[in-house]
Amino acid sequence: MDNYNSSQNVNEHRIWNENNVLFAIFSWFFIALIEFIAVFILKLNSEYSIILAFFLILFYTVLLFFLLEPEILREVNTRETRTIEKPIFKEVIKEIEKPVVRFVDRPVERIVEKPVIQEIEKEVPVYIEKLRDKLNIPKYDYLGSSQTKVYHKHLCRFGKLIKKKYKVSSNSEAFYKKAKYKPCKMCIVKKKKG
């Protein structure tokens, strides 16, 4: 069963119409011009000019009220609370009767005849392992890359990354200098500095 409770908060804000603001400013200049004409051109005395200014300001406030048309904005915040009741489960215990089946073990006697194995002598070949010759793989002191034109010492980690198709091997550093290869900055240049 679900229960819903809702509460509402209503906030009211007064918002002024901003579409006629320019017209309100022009009307203020017009009213100020009327006051200026009355005081300086018609040369009204100070009592009449103050009374005229009072009525003009009163007229302008009424005009401004109707020009800007205040509107009331209402914000309604609704908060709903939902209460859910958990269903109640009752445990039902049922007793089930199952028949018990018992198996009785009886020994089974079997007669197994063992086949007679005759021993026959056969010649068993014996393999003697021949010693292999070691492969004659030359070890070079320097490895170079024809792709990057950089040469390394044979233990340099960057030299081990060179692919076979780009690998150029030699024992002399002069070979690489003639071919305009650059020395590796890790294994050759650092060791010469140190």
Image: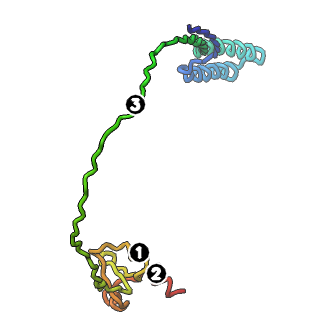
**Amino acid type for the residue under numbered disc 3:** Arg
The residue at the point 74 percent across, 13 percent down is 51
Q: Along the line of sight, which residue is nearer the eye, 16 or 8?
A: 8
From the viewer's perspective, is 18 left or right of 155?
right
The relative height of residue 145 versus residue 90 in the rendered view (above or below) is: below
Q: Are marks 2 and 1 in contact (CB under 8 Å)?
A: yes
Q: Quadrant of residue 69?
A: top right
Q: Earlier in the sequence, mark 3 or mark 1?
A: 3
State how far apart marks 2 and 1 are (Cα): 9 Å
Q: Are marks 2 and 3 in contact (CB under 8 Å)?
A: no
What is the basis of the colouring in this image? Answer: rainbow
Element under disc 2? loop
Where residue 18 appears, x then y in whole percent?
56, 21
Q: Along the line of sight, which residue is nearer the eye, 45 or 180?
A: 180
State how far apart marks 2 and 3 are (Cα): 83 Å
The local crowd at label 1, few if under 14, some if 14 to 19, many if 20 or more residues have their Cα within 10 Å, is some
The relative height of residue 111 versus residue 142 in the rendered view (above or below) is: above
Residue picked out by circle 3? 106
Q: Along the line of sight, which residue is nearer the eye, 53 or 192?
A: 192
From the viewer's perspective, is 109 left or right of 28?
left
Q: Along the line of sight, which residue is nearer the eye, 160 or 145?
A: 160
Q: Quadrant of residue 35?
A: top right
Answer yes or no: is residue 175 visible: yes
Where residue 170 appears, x then y in whole percent?
33, 87
Element under disc 1? loop
Q: Earlier in the sequence, mark 2 or mark 1?
A: 1
Q: Quadrant of residue 26?
A: top right
Residue picked out by circle 2? 187
The residue at the point 66 percent across, 14 percent down is 61
Residue picked out by circle 1? 158
Answer yes or no: is residue 74 visible: no
**Amino acid type for the residue under numbered disc 1:** Phe
